[in-house]
């Protein structure tokens, strides 16, 4: 396969690789891999295989291993190459580098040194899952991997409970059942989606409330790469009668403005709406 003959500026290029299907790589990613002076990868074997599939020749170039267990020496070597006017392309094992993957320290060091830092974007498992889950996508929070221990995991879920957006987690098949049960206990029985093996042969989406998802995992365990998505916390429905009763009680000891603030915060409702109700009630009693 012919790749566009481009000349890269000296700098650090973060390159997204497919999360599953090899053909999901972008043409620009292939061009950068073909043109970079030095290539670094979280998993050199999988990247070499990807380049071989797409006919990107190494032409004697090294593929340097760089991951969470790499010493400072490897990072310094990559930084030195950039300082010498070379282009360095970095890829994590799958998806976008830095998104629950290595690369942060390298990115920060290159930026602080004043080097070019840019990216060839592509597939990301969390965003791919969001498009398939059937849950709200207007706001979401990516929480990565939860802690292994039950106590620490539940504590982290407590911290995330009130976030006003869909929660996205990565999880392993060995821990997913325990994690879903902890989510049910801490977050309540929210709508959820388990997305696994995205873009691969055995892709599967289970769209169920957390209680049913936990039972589903007990009955039929899963394998492969997993993204868990959980709907945001929903404010309970409040009847007009309850609102009126709470406002009357608040108005006994507070001004209209303060009473509206108290009741709006109590029920998680827009202050303007409650303030108007309080005004109407105050006028009716005059």
Image (cartoon, rainbow, N blue to C red):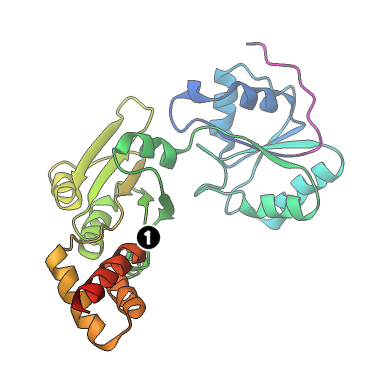
Q: Which residues are magenta?
A: 2-11
Image location of residue 245, percent across then percent down: 15, 75
Left or right, 91 with respect to 252, comes to right
In the rendered view, tell whether residue 250 sits above or below residue 219. Answer: below
In the rendered view, tell whether residue 24 sits above or below residue 186. Answer: above
Q: Is residue 83 visible?
A: yes
Q: Is residue 268 visible?
A: no
Q: Nearer the viewer, residue 73 or 143?
A: 143
Residue 182 falls in which quadrant of the image?
Answer: bottom left
Image location of residue 38, percent across then percent down: 74, 34
Report helix, strand or loop for mark 1. loop
Residue 234 falls in which quadrant of the image?
Answer: bottom left
Left or right, 49 with respect to 70, comes to left
How packed mark 1 is, by other alpha carbons closer than 10 Å (few <14, some 14-19, many 20 or more), is some
Which residue is at a point 81% across and 50% down the rendered structure image? 114
Residue furthest to the top: 1
Residue furthest to the bottom: 253
Residue 286 falls in which quadrant of the image?
Answer: bottom left
**Prevailing secondary structure of the magenta residues:** loop
Image location of residue 259, percent across then percent down: 30, 78
Residue furthest to the right: 84
Which residue is at a point 62% across and 11% down the rendered structure image? 1
Q: Nearer the viewer, residue 86 or 186?
A: 186
Left or right, 147 with respect to 9, comes to left
Image location of residue 128, percent across then percent down: 41, 35
Residue beneath disc 1: 163
Is residue 172 magenta-colored?
no
Is residue 6 magenta-colored?
yes
Which residue is at a point 22% across and 40% down the rendered structure image? 207
Which residue is at a point 25% across and 82% down the rendered structure image? 251
Number of numbered discs overlaid on the protein picture: 1
């Amino acid at each position: 396969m012919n790749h566009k003959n481009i000349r890269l500026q000296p700098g650090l290029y973060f390159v997204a690789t497919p999360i599953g299907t090899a053909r999901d790589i972008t043409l620009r990613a292939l061009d950068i891999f073909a043109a970079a002076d030095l290539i670094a990868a979280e998993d050199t074997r999988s990247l070499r295989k990807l380049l071989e599939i797409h006919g990107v020749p190494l032409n004697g170039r090294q593929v340097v291993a760089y991951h969470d267990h790499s010493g400072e020496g490897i990072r310094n070597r990559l930084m030195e190459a950039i300082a010498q006017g070379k282009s360095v392309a970095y890829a994590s094992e799958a998806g976008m580098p830095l998104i629950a993957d290595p690369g942060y320290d390298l990115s920060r060091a290159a930026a602080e040194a004043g080097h070019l830092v840019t990216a060839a974007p592509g597939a990301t498992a969390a965003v791919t899952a969001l498009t398939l889950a059937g849950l709200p996508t207007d706001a979401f929070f990516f929480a990565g991997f939860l802690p292994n221990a039950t106590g620490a995991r539940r504590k982290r879920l407590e911290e995330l409970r009130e976030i006003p957006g869909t929660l996205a987690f990565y999880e392993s098949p060995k821990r997913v059942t325990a994690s879903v049960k902890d989510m049910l206990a801490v977050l309540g029985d929210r709508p959820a989606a388990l997305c696994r093996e995205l873009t691969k042969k055995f892709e599967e989406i289970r769209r169920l409330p957390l209680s049913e998802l936990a039972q589903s995992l007990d009955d039929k365990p899963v394998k492969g790469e997993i993204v868990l998505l959980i709907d945001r916390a929903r404010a309970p429905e409040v009847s007009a009668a309850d609102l009126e009763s709470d406002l009357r009680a608040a108005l006994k000891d507070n001004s209209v403005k303060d009473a509206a603030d108290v009741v709006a915060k109590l029920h998680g409702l827009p202050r303007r709406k409650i303030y108007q109700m309080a005004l109407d009630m105050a006028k009716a009693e005059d």
